[in-house]
Amino acid sequence: ELPFLRIQVLVTALSESLLHTLININSEVGGT
């Protein structure tokens, strides 16, 4: 099987969670 595909999925999941974290921080800072 392709290890690249697993890496791509992992990177996508990580960047997605990182994006959500950044959005949450921005909303918290903007809320106060």
Image (cartoon, rainbow, N blue to C red):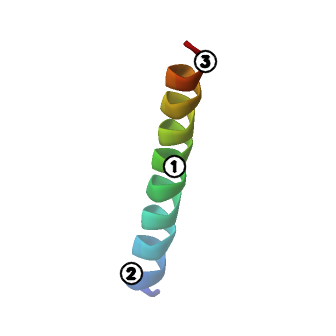
**What is the CA distance from the residue labelled 1 to the residue labelled 3?**
18 Å
**What is the CA distance from the residue labelled 3 to the residue labelled 2?**
42 Å
Q: Residue at x 51, y 49 (%)?
A: 19
Label 3, on which residue?
A: 31
> Which numbered disc flags the more N-terminal residue, 1 or 3?
1
Q: Residue at x 38, y 81 (%)?
A: 3
Image depth: mark 1 or mark 3 in front? 3
Q: Which mark is residue 19?
A: 1
Instruction: Tell me if mark 1 has few (under 14), some (14-19) or many (20+) residues whose alpha carbon lies within 10 angstroms of its own.
Output: few
Q: Which mark is residue 3?
A: 2
Instruction: Tell me if mark 2 has few (under 14), some (14-19) or many (20+) residues whose alpha carbon lies within 10 angstroms of its own.
Output: few
The quadrant holding residue 11 is: bottom left
Residue 28 location (% of width, % of height): 54, 21
Image depth: mark 2 or mark 1 in front? 1
Q: Is residue 6 above or below residue 21?
A: below
Q: Is residue 31 above or below residue 6?
A: above
Residue 2 location (% of width, % of height): 44, 87
Give SS at disc 2. Answer: helix
Residue 17 location (% of width, % of height): 51, 46
Name which residue type carries label 2: Pro
Q: Is residue 6 above or below residue 14?
A: below
